[in-house]
Amino acid sequence: MLNNLIAKESKPLTGRITIPGDKSISHRAIIFGALATGETVVKKLLEGEDVLRTIAAFRAMGVDIERIEAGSYRIQGVGLDGLAEPNDVLDMGNSGTAMRLITGLLASQPFFSVISGDESLRGRPMGRVVNPLRKMGAKISGRNGGKLAPLVIEGQELIPLDYISPVASAQVKTAILLAGLNTAGETSVTEPALSRDHTERMLEAFGAQIQREGLKVTIDGWPDLVGQKIVVPGDISSAAFPMVAALLVPDSDIVIEGVGINPTRTGLLDLLIKMGGQIQQLNPREEGGEPVADLRVRHSQLKGITVPESVIPRAIDEFPVFFVAAALAEGKTVLEGADELRVKESDRISAMVEGLSKLGVALEELPDGVMINGLWERLAGGATVKSHTDHRIAMSLSVAGLVSKKPVKVLGCGNINTSFPGYADLMASLGADIEWSG
Ligand code: S3P
């Protein structure tokens, strides 16, 4: 199977595209649809491997989830107390979201379960959800004292918690709220900065009582969740790749249709616009409780910036490709305070520093970020770089190849399917010189 990508200097990118559905919203649509009563129909669901893991997990717990056609699913909700004990390990593959969210949910379900994932996921921190869940009375064990998967969950009745989280993480927030769904009383999470709020929005749409006061969110246990119709917006985290490519490849002018622009997710737009990027939001509208727009992106000469720390949680998944934009910007770009990047699907700071320096970029790795001296012209390229089996590193380095003098080969790109099936074909449809190779 072809597992590597070769990207070469490209002619202008032009045309209109739509991108696959939002990964975060797709996971939540399956989870809340399964926990509601009645039928939920989801359209434009992301059929990436991560979301397929979530679907498989709920099927393994007895939920009837039918694929009507590409991207359209019908879920027969079983209610908060209707899940069945899975008779095997729930394998979450590469998906941190699936593992952390479902761990929270299962902590308060009255049955035994074991949850695991691939090598990368088994190396990612789980203490951030296990510790607060234990404060609710959850019985969860795992490797390294419960810090690492596989996790063994002896589900039971929990007590509500008022949790002050040390990390701005939607996965932590959602795991606790999911445990709180099945717990009598009010469960709250307060974050140091607002992380993506898709859970709050979708739970409200399904009928839960959610109170939001600043950085604190509170849920009342045992809500009546009622099945919904959901249209998943395009994933801004996937749009980020054609967006940065169009900014960097001279004379490009593209439109990306139907992109989710929830303000908790638009940090990259703010950063790129601050750098001088020409990005327009056209036809703003709302779909399924989430704001959506078409994004017109034109080639722009970018300028280096210092990233304000407050933007970090709103751009957390987009930093790998942001580093590529910074590499082609005039002057210095500095990012600090982003140590969360080290515990994603890979250590995204060191993976990008390694890859970009091989392509001729002058940059310095910082403990919690990076300093990049922009080249303000094409990169040297002509190197083989590693994705570290991380989908976003793979796509980011391939975008770098589109503005490199010599071809760039990115090794190990199969994981792109976790979040962006069809990535290379879609980029090629805009005119990008990118292809799969052995
Ligand atoms: C996600 C939250 C973020 C993000 C991840 C998806 C979610 O992780 O990086 O890709 O769907 O809740 P953290 O909550 O760990 O920051």
Image: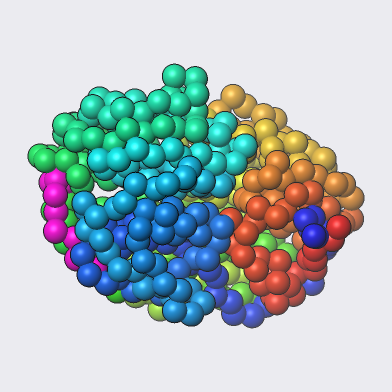
Ligand 1 sits in which quadrant?
top left
Decide if residue 361 is in sight here. Answer: no
- From the top left corner, tell me how far across and down residue 404 is, in percent: 82, 55
Q: Main secondary structure of the magenta part?
A: loop
- 225 inside magenta stretch: yes
The quadrant of the rendering that contains the C terminus is bottom right
- Nearer-the-camera pick, 25 or 303: 25
Range covered by the magenta-colored residues: 215-228
Quarter-wise, where is residue 67 in the image?
bottom left
Q: Name which quarter of the figure residue 349 lies in.
A: top right
- Nearer to us in this view, 389 or 246: 389
Q: Is residue 364 left or right of residue 153?
A: right
- In percent of width and height, residue 187 lies at 17, 38
Residue at figure coordinates x 80%, y 60% from the top left:
2
At 65% from the left and 56% from the top, the residue drawn is: 416
Nearer to me, 243 or 344? 344
